[in-house]
Amino acid sequence: MSEFKKVQAWLDGFSNFEKNSHVLKPVFSLNGIRKLARLLGNPQREFMSVHVAGTVGKGSVCAMTASVLARAGYRTGLYTSPHLVDVRERIVVNGEMVSKREFVETAGAVRKAVRGDEYTYFEVMTAIAMEFFRRKGVEIAVVETGLGGRLDSTRVVRPAAAAITPIGHDHVAVLGRTLEKIAGEKAGIIVRGVKVVSAPQRPAAMKVLKDACRRREAMLFRDRELVNCRAAEKNRRGSVLVVRGFFEAPVEVFLPLAGDFQVGNARTALAVLKVLEGEGFSFSPGCLRRGFGGVRFEGRMEFFEVEGGGTVLLDGAHNPPAAAALARELVKLDGKKLLVLGMMRDKDVRGVGRVLWGAVDEVVPVGLAGGRALTAREVGDVMRSCGREVNFLAGDMDEAMRYAAAHARRGGTVCVSGSLYAVGEAKKWLKRLHGRDAARRA
């Protein structure tokens, strides 16, 4: 077994809310990550941070913000979750994920500080990321919350700016069932004196954010107050955006991420960058163009062409707001559309299914690995209880993709959604069937 696989096996020994059913109702606390960070010498204090929370769009906002910062000449870290195929996807510096050697070395340093099994998978991964960023001399890290914000392990960072993307209902068993309670958890990343950028929010959520900023003497900016952008051109390869308010003259940039919703995410990222200007960072029109043009964000509105003329669309929409954004894109596509749906049992399967099934011709439930995942039969039972016919249950992604590809036929689309883990399994299927380059982005 390679040293990298040994580290992976060690990490898999920690309780992991992302995958395992036995921690579906954990007791969240900051005590573990604070202790671990302290044992490592608090590496997160060695660099500035941008902290991002929200229900939808936070990963995209992080990717855009980090890409522009790196193109502007700043050594930039990016910490996101979960990963699709390789755990190293979570930890990136200037667009390059941590190498296996560096991951092993950094994990080894963290392992020396860990005693027993008192920590969680996410706490240890966060510590590895922070330590790696310190070792690489990162100047600023863009950090995505894993769950909520108030008790998320990423709370140990000291943000130069914070961003809240659109808030909706997700993880209700942990964060609360009302929009106000969920917004309160997300607002937990707002610390005293920080400048906060918010995407458009529903009134109930915005009131919570305003109250949190007032209590903590933080400055709240609506992203539209700082900068604006619109899509001049759009297709499945991305959008040409016209940015106004960032510089004296409008700037055109190309954003290679599909989906109308990415225009709003771009505006939020631009507003964060505008706030960072007040913290001493500087940007030129050129670095803005290069930064947005170089954004890569896998598993979100990602199209692939496969042999036989069909299209595979990967989008990890796992809650009703994200599903609604995906549905708006699906209805624009021609040909027969099949939805391969794999989900975690703590998600709103009924809500996601109802939003998506009106945009497709057939739903193919698929089972995913891990105790937290629903079986294909369980997903199918929910679909049937809502009045949707289910013709086929797939035990794994290979079976699901073979069936869906055969029934979508030439000119049709197979959409894989419901969970980023489903998307990750579909990526593995594409690679096994077509090789690294045979399934090309459409």
Image: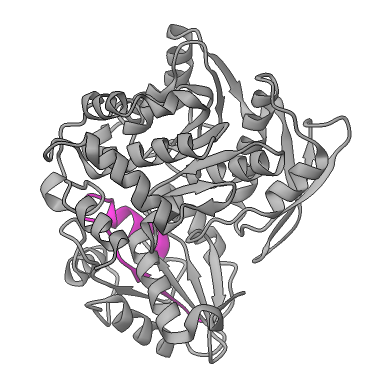
Q: Position of residue 314 (x, y in %)?
A: 47, 67
- Write down the quadrant of residue 352 in the picture: bottom left
Q: Position of residue 425 (x, y in %)?
A: 35, 70
In the image, is residue 98 part of the stretch drawn in magenta? no
In the image, is residue 337 part of the stretch drawn in magenta? yes
* 104 relative to 386 in the view: left or right: right
In this rendering, is residue 379 above or below 434? Answer: above
The C terminus lies in quadrant = bottom right
Q: Position of residue 34 (x, y in %)?
A: 28, 24
Q: Nearer the viewer, residue 226 or 91?
A: 91
* 20 relative to 352 in the view: left or right: left
Q: Nearer the viewer, residue 77 or 360?
A: 77
Q: Position of residue 61 (x, y in %)?
A: 56, 42
Residue 59 in sight in this render: yes
Residue range in magenta is 336-356
Q: Nearer the viewer, residue 157 or 9?
A: 9
In this rendering, is residue 83 above or below 359? Answer: above
The residue drawn where x is 43% and y is 15% is 212
The residue drawn where x is 52% and y is 40% is 77
In this rendering, is residue 440 above or below 299? Answer: below
The residue drawn where x is 51% and y is 27% is 47
The residue drawn where x is 65% and y is 24% is 275
